[in-house]
Amino acid sequence: MVSIDHVTDKKNLLLLVQLRWLAVIGQVVTILVVQYGLGIALPLFELAAVIGCLIALNLFSLFRHYRSDVVSNTELFVALLIDVAALTVQLYLTGGAANPFVSLYLLQVTLGAVLLDAWSTWALVVITSGCYVGLSALSRDIFREHSADFDRLHLQGTFVCFLLSAVLLVSFISRINRNIRARDAHLARLRQQSVEEDHIVRMGLLASGAAHELGTPLATLSVILNDWQHMPSLNQSPETVQEIEEMQLQVERCKTIVSGILMSSGEARGEGTLRTTVNTFFDGLAAEWRVTRSPARFDYVNAFGADEAIVSDTALKQVIFNLFDNALDASPGLVKANVVRADGNLVLTVGDRGPGFSKEMLAAFGKPYQSSKGRHGAGLGLFLVVNVVRKLGGTVAADNPPEGGARVTLTLPLASLSPRSEHGH
């Protein structure tokens, strides 16, 4: 996996490329002004060769940016070293340390302080300092014929250098700050996701522990009810017999729910993973929900098409039940569900004819304790839905369709449900 720092470095490399294009344009304009505007003879061929090298470096950097996912600190360091080398050659050819543009070394150091690790920045300081000292001793004197105007030319050059450095720094630092803010926002989202997943784990442990504790009393109740069914004194009343049977059914249902909780937490005992197909899974799930919840109207449409083998995920089943239950709570008169295939994904849409989601709920969709039911502790259902689906590599979206009500769309990659990916979960 590519780290966030590497992603940021890749963006910074692109900004460095953009800054270099601006520098190349500025160098060309400056050379033309000095050569033809001020009448100072410059070694145009050598300067053009240096600019050509910078253009080649930029083209290579663009190639690296689009072909590689990782840009290292060393690569950025080398790129800045080449910029320093190019600047040093240009300064050597145009007056050395006497050239007012020698202060552009500070621009390179500033960029290094923003982009590079500490050791690289200090190395750049040492290298640029050495270049400055070298230029003080070795350089071409191009101002010999203009010694009378040297102070004026130097002042004008210093102003141009200041203006160029200020524009480049403001442009570059502003974009760097935007990259840093984007990285910080991404880190904040990751931290929030970690907190939410920790919340899920704690709730899962609580549910698993409760399921274990409920197993024994439910088994005891089942034995007692079974004994009652065979007691003559209780068999004489048809009403009592019917009530005992109903109680037995409800106890069995509770035991099934407890087993489902244990299976979702990976603690169920049984034959192992159950394999099924998309159509079998969703048709059976819809039929079971229709029987257990008895909605007034349940419009279920399976338009998935050609069947696909998947693993029967108990957690996913509970997630879909949760969506159906939420829709039923909001709209007792109508719940709609539609299953389709789209671009290698399984898409389930659940809708209702209720009041719809408020703007606040849509903005905080998937966050814990966001609910319109007005009960303390409500709102965990959609939170669990979003996190379980995210674990499976899918997404959940909510909106209010034009025809009214609310709509939740669950999108899952079929590859994540395939039996071939079973060991990857």
Image: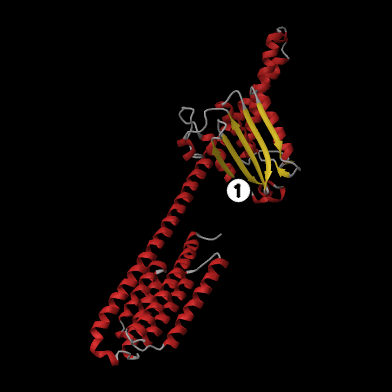
Q: Is residue 267 above or below residue 405?
A: below
Residue 339, position in %: x, y? 67, 38
Q: Is residue 275 visible?
A: no
Q: How many marks?
A: 1
* Amino acid bearing label 1: Gly
Residue 224, position in %: x, y? 66, 19
Residue 387 falls in which quadrant of the image? Answer: top right
**Left of 393 or right of it: where is 29?**
left
Q: Which of the pair 20/389 is nearer the observer?
A: 20
Q: Residue at x 40, y 89 (%)?
A: 43
Residue 119 falls in which quadrant of the image? Answer: bottom left
What residue occupies the far front of the structure in this picture? 37
Residue 346 falls in which quadrant of the image? Answer: top right
Q: Is residue 35 above or below residue 292?
A: below
Q: Dot 1, how many residues are within 10 Å of its Cα: few (below 14), some (14-19), or many (20+)?
A: some
**Left of 387 or right of it: where is 145?**
left
Residue tagged 1: 393
Tell me the SS state at disc 1.
loop
Q: Is residue 66 visible?
A: yes
Q: Residue at x 51, y 60 (%)?
A: 3
Q: Is residue 182 above or below residue 314?
A: below
**Left of 244 or right of it: where is 132?**
left
Residue 396, position in %: x, y? 57, 42
